[in-house]
Amino acid sequence: MGNNTVNTIMKDNMTTNNVVNTTTNTVTNTQRNSILSVKDLHVSFSTYGGTVNAVRGVSFDLKHGETLAIVGESGSGKSVSSKAVMGLLSKNASIPSGEIHYDGSNLLKLTDKEFSKIRGSKISMIFQDPMLSLNPVMKVGKQITEMLFLSGKIKKKDAIAKAAQLMKAVGIEDAEKRFHQYPFQFSGGMRQRIVIACALAGEPEILICDEPTTALDVSVQAQILDLISDIQKKRNLSVIFITHDLGVVAGIADRIAVMYAGKIVEIGTCDEIFYDPRHPYTIKLLAAMPDMDMDGSEELISIPGAPPDMLYPPKGDAFAARNDQALKIDFEKEPPMFPISETHFAATWLLHPYAPKVELPPSLQKRINKAKTESKKG
Amino acid sequence: MFKYITQRILLMILTLFIILVMTYFLVQSVPGGPFADPTIKPAVRAVLNRRYHLDQPIWMQFLQYLKGLSHLDFGVSIKVQPQADVFKMIAARFPVTIQLNLLSNLVILPVGFILGILAALKKNSIVDHSIQIMVVVFISVPSFVLAALLQYIFAYKLGWFPITFSTARHMNLEKLLSMVLPVLALSFGGIAYIARYLRDELSEVLNSDFMLLARAKGLTMRQAVVRHALRNALFPLVGMILGIFITVLSGSIVVENVFAIPGTGRLSLAAISSNDYPLVMANVLLYTAIGLFARLILDLAYGLIDPRVTVGGGKNAE
Amino acid sequence: MPNNNLDDYLKAANLSREDFAFVEAGQIQADRIPDTPPIGFFRDAMRRFGRNKASVLSLAVVVLIAFFAIVGPFMDSFTYRQQNVKWDKLPPRVPYLEKLGIFNGTAVLTVQKANIETDYKIGYIKTIREHNIKANGLDVPMADIVVDMYKLKGADDVYFWLGSDGLGRDLWTRLWRGARISLAMAFLAVFLNALIGVIYGAISAYYGKNTDLFMQRVIEIIGSIPLLPLLILFIIKFGTGIVPIVLALCITGWIGMANLIRSQFYRYKGREYVLAAQTMGVRDRRVIFRHILPNAIGPAITQTAISIPEFIMAESMLAYLGLGIQAPEASVGVLLSEGQQVLFSAPHLLLFPAIIISLLMLCFNLISGGLRDAFDPAQRG
């Protein structure tokens, strides 16, 4: 299993990066301006079986220059939310309510033509599978510079130079030769670099990464993650990073939003989520991650059951059915977002003053304590 | 590349030869023969058979036939147009068939194209549904039924078009009008095939990730459709065009009969129903050669337009 | 996301401490098995097929046609071969319906005006239009008249529901009998071709290597012979009975199925679960029949359904070219071919068979479309 590598990365970052985070984030996160803000977004799909409520009231702000990770299992609505931000939902999708504010306008009110002026040049996106997201019968160079050429930003003869520059920026050697090759002549990791180059060509402010490493080999994953955070720093991008893998997030996110069944159940800085998780789902997710220091005596916690069928969203807290410490009210009323700190919110009834105290699973508690002491020492 | 083409052509000739042998012996073994008519006196029949070498052993006849073929001598017609040179007979009729075929393709391609693209872009709308219904109806009504219905309604009842094909040497209005119904009868099936194919293919491509990336880069829907989706959906269409050419070719055997069009289709039918061996052979060879040639062109064409296919090898592994 | 209305929400919720009790473990539903019984692939597909209205309607129409093909010929007093040359080419006439002005056995004829009183006196009903035509330099007065053809031909009490043909045979009886034969031939051909195709494809893919190469070469050669001339030759050689025609349809008809089975085979041959079965020592035959072939059932059924209209079409095309089943039997194609010859004087002889064959083609196409969607695993879920 490749998990070990990921975990090392994760662990390293928990110990080193987050030290930086704790000092800088608390200051900057509250002061930075929002570049993008999503308010009470609902997305539903009309399907053969009925209406699927994929996203049910998601709100978040993306701040200038930060990386916001959205974590959740498949079907939690994380990809759908990001596609809504890009205006790239499929035809059977509808947005019954919600707002997406960028640069003073509500993106949901734009026509496709107006939106296309924002896509690529303001907000760009890369996708999960680089095998599928490049046009198989178009030269990669052309795919990278296509939009620049179409919008009249560059002349045809400058395209090669521009593409070469972008390809170099994403770590592709021998760019002049590679310009004329087709996607099938590249490896998976190389293709994802090309995809990133495509996304960067318009020099966007926001980059949405939809599980950009999921389809790649573990060794390549780390390279692409490095590339993304490198580019983010160099270009001062704001990044929305979507993943189902908390381990990947640890290394690169400033803030984390955890999604479940079409809602954000907890959002906070990287430290807050990793060291002070409050929502049962977040807690279980963290506890379910294997750890290098685990000895054989500890059992890895797994979350029973499967996410709910979004054709019929459950009443109350959607996670209650899989939670062995669910409260009665979890099945009846939807929990509101309780504030924990300036930056940390969680939608769970456990934060209500009436709620009984729930202990973290011992293995997780142990891990958190250890990480905290290490970071103090470091 | 050159080696591959030579290989393919050699293979094609081999296939053609096998078919030639099969057809030859099949035709020869049909009971009766050209002079089976009981009113012909036995003595006359013997003379006739001798004249056309039908009295010799079959393999001798075959060898002689092959010898003729080597310098494009396909023999002479026995019954349809006695003593006429088969090659010349076909040469005189083939242009008519090809002309109708090309005209049909000129109708099929743009119409099928537009309908298919429209249906894919407006998928699951009323436009799509009506096109889908049209496609199923076009595919379902046999071309000969369609030909007869068109002939009855538009030529006989309404009198808008001539009932039969005009044999005027030069193109004039009457000849053009007389072509309308046969071309329509030949076109409906092809239109339906292209439209259905393009709709399925295009709607698949429209849902692909690279369309998402293209739009994420900032291309408008229209730009993305034209530059990415259409381009990709059109690759396999090259194959469809040749397929449609062949389908129209065999469809014209019937349609030529309905409208009394002097083409190779009608000639084949006449040859077959009168056991005119040399004529049957030549027609079968003609149709087979066209079919094989079309396939060869197709394979080569794919190699030229689709970068993933290297001629001589298979598709590159993804 | 700070929830400004948090306090309001909590107030409105009106919560008590009891609400915050832990739920007993028994009530947790996470790993509960769904109540619905498991649905097999086949039943699931059938259920999906049932939801496709066009396909179900088509199936109903096909069943109806099949029903008439069985009992239709016995519904009136004529037999399919009973000739009455005096009553030739009579238009359709149906009791009761005739009072509504349709199917009343009348026809519009264009005749010389002078002949109305003599030749058409018996059945004459009315004149629609009068006009002159030039013949031999003279103006001949003509008239379009409505004539009761049944009276005219002395068949007052006779009802040919769909009219009669050139030999005075009842089209209703012949049409349904023809539909019966067409359907029977198509189904027989489909069955044989499916059988040949499955066996051929399975052998070709299972043995692979040179066997496969050779068998594919054979398919390529057979497939590249133009079909129609081949069919025609075959039928001329072996005659025009049901068996030769069905066999002729088997020359190339199985190629589609063989290719499909072969590709399915190759697709699943290398799958991990097949390799796993082989590693665990499952015998080859069991691997083929239990692990590989079932994957091909859906596409194979669809392929079969697609080929039904193709065979109906091919058969009627042959018949149309005069190579159909021999008189006095008739298939729909034979009727079409007969109708074509008298198209202008008795259009009903072409129209009714044309409707039946178009309906059959349409319905089978819609059914196969519905089956394809129902069996498409990509849509499952």
Image: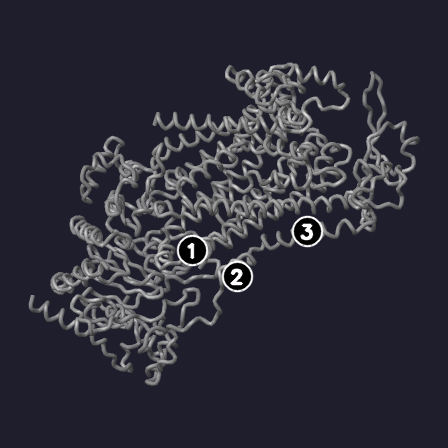
Q: Do the residues indicated by labels 1 and 2 lie within the same chain of the protein? A: yes
Q: Nearer the viewer, residue A42 or B79?
A: B79
Residue on which the image places disc 2? C43
Label 3 residue SS: helix
- The amino acid pointed to by label 1 is Val
- Helix, strand or loop under label 2: helix
Mark 3 vs mark 2: which is more N-terminal? 2
Question: Which of the colour schemes (rainbow, by chain, secondary structure, one colour) is used?
Answer: one colour
Q: Amino acid at mark 3?
A: Ala
Amino acid type shown at disc 2: Arg
Q: Which residue is mark 1?
A: C287
**Left/right of residue B216 with respect to residue B279 in the rendered view:** left
Q: Chain of mark 2?
A: C
- Judging from the image, what secondary structure is the residue with disc 1 in? helix
Host chain of mark 3: C
Q: Tell me whether the residue at label 1 lies in contact with that at label 2, contact meaning CB atoms closer than 8 angstroms.
A: no
Mark 3 to mark 1 CA distance (whole Å): 39 Å
